[in-house]
Image (spheres, helix red, strand yellow):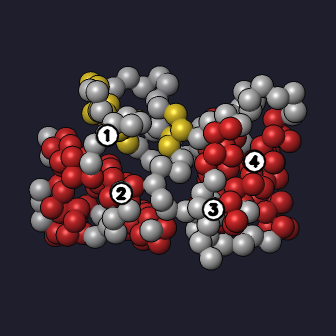
Amino acid sequence: MSYNRNMKWLNDRRIVYRRDPITDVPTYTTDTYSYYANGTYQSYNLFNSKSKITTYKSLKWHYLVLYYLNIDGVDGDEVSLEDDMRYIFKFIANKENGFVTFFIKNKILEEIISDVLMQGGEPPVNRKRKIIFKDYSGLSFAEKMTIVGKLSGRQKLDATDIYESMVALHDMGEKITNSKLARLLGCSVRTIQRHSCVNLKREKQQLNEEI
């Protein structure tokens, strides 16, 4: 059985799950997106697509991001941060709340939560992004793809451009293929293959598994 993601629960409690870069300055910004020519690691945007959490590794990364973004506390409650986060983590881990695709044994969940609470608080490992679309930009999938292709084609193709295109396809619920990436970036499939390192191939597989 598939469950709808209960975003209302997070929003009602003012839980932060997305944030634009705080110190990195965009090369330029428009009404619909910001562009970082050198990329930024500071963009966090959880639950932006219909894809759900499918692995323990992804679940732990989501927890680390939530801990980092909510380090100042949740909704002004006088409950300890640890208690707050433990409550949030367990809610997300409950398959019936629509965030994960699998049932998680309580022992494993407790181990993950304890590990996150011990090491959390620092900026989690994140992918570099060049294009950050603004919330409620109103852009269609085709319009976003046009922007990604145009901006990525301004300079020599690199792994960040390919990843940017992969994320754009993923966020719109599109299966990622080399032919789609090639059309989007205005190059050949062979060029995509040549620039796809082991990490990118692994990331592509993981993103496609989430769709």
Going from the N terminus, do you reach mark 3 or mark 1 first?
3
Whether residue 89 is situated above or below residue 104 in the rendered picture: above
Mark 2, residues whose alpha carbon is within 10 Å: few (<14), some, or many (≥20)? some
Q: How far apart are marks 3 and 1 (CA)?
A: 25 Å
Going from the N terminus, do you reach mark 4 or mark 1 first?
4
Whether residue 125 is situated above or below residue 49 in the rendered picture: above
Are the residues tagged 2 and 1 within 8 Å (C-beta)?
no
Q: What residue is drawn where x is 38% and y is 42%? A: 129
Secondary structure at badge 3 equals loop
Secondary structure at badge 1 equals loop
Q: Distance between the residues labelled 3 and 4?
A: 13 Å
Q: Name the residue under label 1.
A: 138
Q: Name the residue under label 2.
A: 172
Discs 2/1, front: 1
The type of residue carrying mark 4 is Ile
The type of residue carrying mark 1 is Gly
Q: What residue is drawn where x is 39% and y is 66%? A: 204
Q: Name the residue under label 3.
A: 98
Q: What residue is drawn where x is 31% and y is 33%? A: 33
Q: How far apart are marks 4 and 1 (CA)?
A: 30 Å
Whether residue 37 is situated above or below residue 162 in the rendered picture: above
Q: Mark 4 points at which residue?
A: 88
